[in-house]
Image (tube, helix red, strand yellow):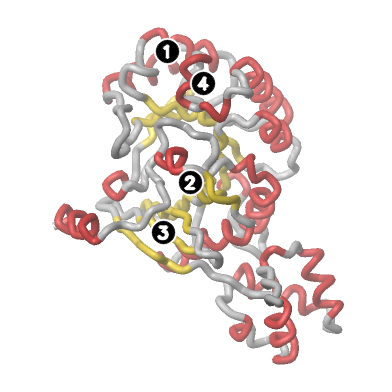
Amino acid sequence: MAATRKHDIKELSREELAKLVQELGQPAFRVKQLISWLYEKHAHSFDEMTNLPASLRQALSERYRLSIPREATKQISRDGSRKYLLQLADGVTVETVGMPRKNKLSVCISTQAGCAMGCVFCATGNAGFVRSLTAGEMYDQVMHVAEDFGTRPTSVVFMGQGEPFANYDETMKALRWLNAPDGAGIGARHLTVSTCGVIPGIRKFAQEPEQFTLAVSLHSVIQPIRNKLMPGTKRYTLPRLREAMDYYIEKTGRRPTYEYALMSGINDNRPDMEELVRFCEGTLAHVNIIQMNHIDGSLIEPSTQEKADELVHMLQMHGVEATIRQSRGNDIDAACGQLKQRALTKAEERKLEEAKQ
């Protein structure tokens, strides 16, 4: 009979860790020490937990595994961003991006391996869905980037592969460990979740006590166009989405962000822009204009700088805050919509190195 696969210890909640320590006959203060090793110090093995008795370390290793993702590939952009392909304990891979700027480090993490939403402009959606990640696997992505850069992350965006609200509970657990003083200690307002517009998730998120921030991928406010661009959101119609966002703003008092990736001839025409203005006018929302990045094999092309400037001006004229997001890491396919969960071929590695020289 095959041995049962051990669960990762980071799958346990605080309460479950406390219960485990008690079951093992250890004093309560060991819980704090264990959590410190798992989250603050990000230990790579139980043996590193030197202030825990050897007997406790042995008992923990017999019951649980402590998995750390393996770096399969790392690419470094001209702008200093780094994209990692990380292999998890079961062999599944996900992509993560670290984006340094002056004395700050932002990390973009994945909540799922692949994505089921099927957005046509996104390399992740085109690759299909594999599985959802655990909170520990999300947290480990942040810590991997922190260790590679040798500095503490100042913000984390859940904007990598996957739909966070399709993995709601684990996403919330990861957010809370990243926010916790005995975790990563990152302020709640510096932790942002990006959703395609999953309405039940938005309404639930509005009721959470922490001040985590919300971004919604909009990309069109003309229903037939949005349905084609984002087929996974068809059941979440724009009127219902607007109602959910009004509820979120009323409940939290926080300013959400709408993400709008400009695509040539698809959503950058004057009627599209005017509809976006009408959708956002009179709300607290901020609009982030994204100049869509090129994806190999896609027929969709990015719009122009002139169109982006025009849209920002239109929004601002109607009292809507709007900015153009500067793409980071697009030379290594690390920018918005480019994550595709694939290792580089040797030919691609050579081409990338040649481009840097």
Q: Nearer the viewer, mark 4 or mark 1?
A: 4
Residue under the image location 28 percent in, 53 percent down:
77
Label 1 environment density (alpha carbons within 10 Å; few <14, some 14–19, many ≥20): some
Say what secondary structure mark 1 lies in: helix
Dot 2 amino acid type: Gly
Dot 1 amino acid type: Asp
Measured from the top left, where is residue 44 in percent x and y?
A: 55, 76
Q: Are marks 4 and 3 in contact (CB under 8 Å)?
A: no
Mark toward the start of the polypeptide (4 vs 3): 3
Most foreground residue, 287 or 240: 240
Most foreground residue, 13 or 250: 13
C-alpha distance separating marks 3 and 2: 12 Å
Most foreground residue, 2 or 298: 2
Q: Are marks 4 and 1 in contact (CB under 8 Å)?
A: no
Residue under the image location 39 percent in, 31 percent down:
290
Measured from the top left, where is residue 333 in percent x and y?
A: 33, 46
Say what secondary structure mark 3 lies in: strand
Say what secondary structure mark 2 lies in: loop
Dot 3 amino acid type: Leu
Measured from the top left, where is residue 7 in percent x and y?
A: 69, 69
Mark toward the start of the polypeptide (2 vs 1): 2
User: To which residue does mark 3 refer?
Assistant: 85
Mark toward the start of the polypeptide (2 vs 4): 2
Mark toward the start of the polypeptide (4 vs 1): 4
User: To which residue does mark 1 refer?
Assistant: 272
Pick out the residue farthest to the bottom. 54
User: To which residue does mark 2 refer?
Assistant: 160
**In the rendered image, which quarter is residue 189 located in?**
top right
**In the rendered image, which quarter is residue 309 located in?**
top left
User: To which residue does mark 4 refer?
Assistant: 227
